[in-house]
Image (cartoon, grey):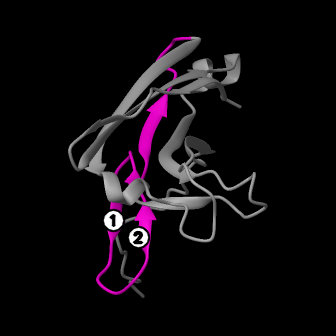
Amino acid sequence: MASISSITLDPINVVVANATVNVHVTVGFTNYDINSGQQYKMVCRLMGDDTAEGNPDDLIPGGSLTPTLGFPGGPTLDLGQLIQADGLASKSFTFTKTLAKSALDEDKAPEPNPDEIQAEVTLTPILPATVTRQSAVQTLVA
């Protein structure tokens, strides 16, 4: 299975009320991945790191750096980005997003500040699809 060999979140650039984030990811592929054309869904998103406070990490609102699909009044699905080795042992990806600085304010009182942000990348293998096909219909003739 492919592995995430490196992930880097650049220092966050804040200009007035907006913050721009850049995430760099390198994915390493196995011989199986290279030879089979195995595909993966890669999801990259920003998380508020609350480890020091003893709380679970929170997804930053609007912090998905790969495509999503939202439903009014419902959940948002991470569609991710489809990747494969394309004959290479590793590939590098860069994700960039500008969002409101207020979205990065993940530590609310009484939690201590400053806000700690990290990038999280998930690789999920895409399983082979089942293929079904039917023949033309034949009528029984007696």
Asked if residue 80 can be seen in this view, the reply is: yes
Residue topped by disc 2:
76
Q: Does residue 40 sit above or below 104 in this rendering? A: above
Mark found first going from the N terminus, 1 or 2: 1
The residue drawn where x is 43% and y is 24% is: 93
Front residue of this view, candidates 10 and 105? 105
Instruction: Determine the CA span between mark 1 and mark 2.
Output: 6 Å
Q: Residue at x 34, y 59 (%)?
A: 102
In the image: residue 15, left or right of residue 56: left
Where residue 28 sits: x, y (%)? 62, 19
Q: Quadrant of the N terminus?
A: top right
Foreground residue, 57 or 114? 114
Q: Which residues are magenta?
A: 62-88
Label pair 1/2, CB-CB below 8 angstroms:
yes
Q: Where does residue 112 sit, x and y in percent of width and height? A: 63, 58
Q: Quadrant of residue 111?
A: bottom right
Instruction: Look at the picture and state if 90 lies above or below 71.
Output: above
> Amino acid under label 1?
Leu
What secondary structure is found at the residue carrying circle 2? Answer: strand
